[in-house]
Image: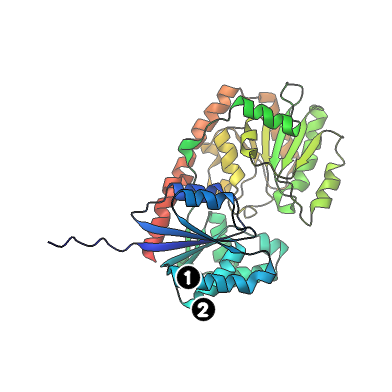
């Protein structure tokens, strides 16, 4: 008697650009159901090997690097992708980030291989800062692809209302996180991180944390002066701003910071373990300037999960989340310096205990599980792939 043949699985090829380390793709392969869909990766990266590539390969998935070091490699990237498509023969090609999406879609059209989907990782950034070339790329990508994943309702609204994408093309799928693997970092690690960055833990001064590249849309015109107002009450307070990578606006905001007392603030270009530092902040402030400023807002989720007292405006993910359902959050209006300062001062006066913060974290994880668990994301992805 002949054994029945197993059904042929759909093959999904992820094409990603300029990513060398990523929890997102690590969690994706950790939770991928090989019995439902076959998975492979291509990275357009400036280096041949990197941490995320090694992680993916160690999990048993094929992952290829095509060297891309800038616009001079554009044609080479398209040709390399076309060649890879012909060899791999994916049923679906899933693009992430600008170069991967634009070059990958061109290659897909030229070869006629694979249905295409891309994840929209930004919201109104190009409309604000690159209104001609950036928006043109977005509109071309929207036209060329078969489907688009919006990662929040705000991102969905930009696609549908600002860029006039047909509704049937867009599907809402939140980023997903493995909420069962979250734990408080060891005290020794926190001590090391604090020594590294000069963060006091001796109770002599309050610590205000922010994670924000120096862009206007991050609300820095209001949050930096608000910290000055906090200093009037707590002169020993410290402000630490992480992810302070260069932008065209850097000089403007460093001039604003320079008006604060010397030694009261510090900017940090990059800290790979910055998520752990939520546990040493007395208050975390994240106040983007409008509903659409954040496409998702990873720091909203990370700070809620940590249970740190927060001052938020409602952008990205936080616009989709009812603030009454989560603990440890004070919401302020957009672009409101005084409200930011007042809510920060309220947290400094209340000063929740470690046990209270742990309770904030437990309740917040329970709420977030209904929106952004990795299991929900994976189910939504499989449903999308099945429909294509």
Left or right? Give the position of 209 relative to 41. Answer: right
Residue 70, x across and y down, in percent: 68, 66
Q: Quadrant of the N terminus?
A: bottom left
* Contact (Cβ within 8 Å) of mark 2 with mark 1: no
Left or right? Give the position of 9 relative to 381. Answer: left
Residue 385, x across and y down, in percent: 40, 61
- The answer to whether 364 is drawn above or below residue 18 in the figure is above
- At label 2, counting other C-alpha atoms closer than 10 Å, the crowd grade (few under 14, some 14-19, many 20 or more) is few
Q: CA distance from mark 2 to mark 1?
A: 10 Å
Q: Which mark is residue 12?
A: none
Which quadrant of the view contains residue 268? top right
Q: Quadrant of the C terminus?
A: bottom left
Label 1 secondary element = helix
Residue 238, x across and y down, in percent: 77, 32
User: Where does label 2 land, which residue?
Assistant: 110
- The answer to whether 213 is drawn above or below residue 206 in the figure is below
Q: Earlier in the sequence, mark 2 or mark 1?
A: 1
The mark tally for this picture is 2
Nearest the viewer among 361 and 107 is: 107
Nearer mark to the viewer, of 2 and 1: 1
Nearest the viewer among 246 and 7 is: 7
- The answer to whether 79 is drawn above or below residue 369 in the figure is below
């Amino acid at each position: 008697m002949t054994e029945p043949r197993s059904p042929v699985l759909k093959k999904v090829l992820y094409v990603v650009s300029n990513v060398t380390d990523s929890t997102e793709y690590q969690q994706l392969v950790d939770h991928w159901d090989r019995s439902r869909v076959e998975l492979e990766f291509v990275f357009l990266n400036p280096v041949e090997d990197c941490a995320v590539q090694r992680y993916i390969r160690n999990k048993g998935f094929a992952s290829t690097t095509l060297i891309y070091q800038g616009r001079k490699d554009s044609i080479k990237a398209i040709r390399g992708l076309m060649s890879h498509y012909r060899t791999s023969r994916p049923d679906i090609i899933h693009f992430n980030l600008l170069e991967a999406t634009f070059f990958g879609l061109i290659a897909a059209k030229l070869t006629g291989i694979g249905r295409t989907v891309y994840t929209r990782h930004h919201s109104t950034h190009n409309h604000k800062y690159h209104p001609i070339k950036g928006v043109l790329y977005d509109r071309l990508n929207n036209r060329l692809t078969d489907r688009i994943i919006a990662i929040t309702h705000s991102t969905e609204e930009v696609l549908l209302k600002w860029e006039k994408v047909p509704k049937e093309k867009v599907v809402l799928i939140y980023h997903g996180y493995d909420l069962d693997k979250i734990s408080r970092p060891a005290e020794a690690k926190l001590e090391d991180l604090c020594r590294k960055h000069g963060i006091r833990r001796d109770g002599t001064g309050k610590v205000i944390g922010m994670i924000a590249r120096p862009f206007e849309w991050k609300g820095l015109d209001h949050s930096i002066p608000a910290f000055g107002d906090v200093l009037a009450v707590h002169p020993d307070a410290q402000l630490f701003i992480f992810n302070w990578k260069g932008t065209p606006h850097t000089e403007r905001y460093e001039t604003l910071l320079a008006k604060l007392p010397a030694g009261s603030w510090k900017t940090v270009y990059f800290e790979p373990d910055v998520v752990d530092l939520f546990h040493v902040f007395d208050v975390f402030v994240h106040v983007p300037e409008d509903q659409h400023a954040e496409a998702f807002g990873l720091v909203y989720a990370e700070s809620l999960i940590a249970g740190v007292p927060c001052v938020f405006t409602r952008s990205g993910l936080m616009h989709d989340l009812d603030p009454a359902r989560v603990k440890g959050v004070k919401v302020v209006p957009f672009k409101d310096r005084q409200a930011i300062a007042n809510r920060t001062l309220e947290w400094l006066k209340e000063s929740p205990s470690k046990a209270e913060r742990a309770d904030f974290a437990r309740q917040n994880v329970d709420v977030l599980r209904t929106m952004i668990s990795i299991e929900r994301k994976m189910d939504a992805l499989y449903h999308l792939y099945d429909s294509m």
